[in-house]
Image (tube, rainbow, N blue to C red):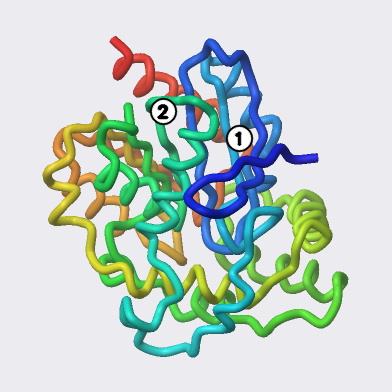
Amino acid sequence: MALRASANGIEIAYDTFGSPGGRPLLLIMGLGSQMIHWDEEFCTLLADGGHHVIRFDNRDVGESTHFHDAGTPSFGPVSSADAPYLLGDMADDAAGLLDALGLESAHVAGVSMGGMIAQAMAIRHPDRVRSLTSIMSTPSPQAAPPTEAAMAALMSPPSPDRETAIARALETWKVIASPGYPFDADRIARLAGLSYDRAYDPAGVARQLAAIMASGDRAPLLKELPVPALVLHGEQDQLVPLPGGIATADAVPGARLVTYPGMGHDLPRPLWPEFAAEIGGLTAAAER
């Protein structure tokens, strides 16, 4: 059962790993993905590296507040006036969670949309972000448009039941997952089932997508960041192709870019020790 905190006017579901005395590390998940997609084994690996790990459900997914009254955004060009909220609001949620947990600041790592939220958090709340790790993300959708196959997989219709949701998750991840690593169908099916059971809300995912499309280009503001930064990206990513990671690293002063052959738009289990080592190296250096 997740813990709950009031933050930025909403309820956020979260849990933690490791000693509260460790380096605080806030993990932000991507579009439509719940905190359980930060695998417990990976979180434990980060905790064993000296971190106090916090993972949480973004608004509109999982057990955090859903904006049902906002309805389903129409697809097509989205302006900031059309979107129910922006990535900046989601960044404020994350900062509010730090407030609720009594943390003045934390190291922040995000994947995909979570990387965008982490970038926005560093821009809006630079004093709250000790270091920034942006994983398979981008400063703007225009910097790294998805392939046609990835976009088609992303835009699959809502599922009428649990079994269909699991089947469609497997179809989607077969397209965007890492071609250079084994496809873990059992793990994907398990997470899809758990996600469905915790909260199935396709309209919430559409609202998150609208936030991405309406939030503009962060690159100009990223160029002013005083935050130590790490960019991790797969070289075979179809959903946020490698130019997105390159654009992020180019924008953030002094950012370290690490790319992985064979990695797509997921976090392959064989790379978890490398990811943990890279993140741990950044956070330890930032503390010094």
Secondary structure under tag 2 reads: strand
Mark 1 crowdedness (10 Å alpha carbons): few <14, some 14-19, many ≥20: few
Residue drawn at 33 percent across, 81 percent down: 81
Q: Position of residue 55 (x, y in %)?
A: 59, 38
What type is the residue that disc 2 sits on? Answer: Ala
27, 238: nearer the viewer: 27
Residue 179 is at least partly visible in this image: no
Residue drawn at 86 percent across, 70 percent down: 162
Tell me how far mark 1 sits from mark 2, CA to CA: 27 Å
Q: Position of residue 128 (x, y in %)?
A: 33, 32
Residue 24 is at least partly visible in this image: yes
Q: Position of residue 238 (x, y in %)?
A: 45, 65
Mark 2 crowdedness (10 Å alpha carbons): few <14, some 14-19, many ≥20: many
Which quadrant holds the N terminus? top right
Q: Is 191 drawn above or below residue 276 in the view shown? A: below
Classify residue 286 as left or right of residue 41.
Answer: left
Secondary structure under tag 1 reads: helix
Classify residue 9 as left or right of residue 38.
Answer: left
Residue drawn at 29 percent across, 64 percent down: 140
Quarter holding residue 159 = bottom right
Q: Which mark is residue 106?
A: 2
Q: Nearer the viewer, mark 1 or mark 2?
A: 2
Q: Which mark is residue 270?
A: 1
First in sequence: mark 1 or mark 2?
2
Q: Is 72 drawn above or below residue 180 in the view shown? A: below
Residue drawn at 45 percent across, 75 percent down: 84
What type is the residue that disc 1 sits on? Answer: Pro
9, 151: nearer the viewer: 9
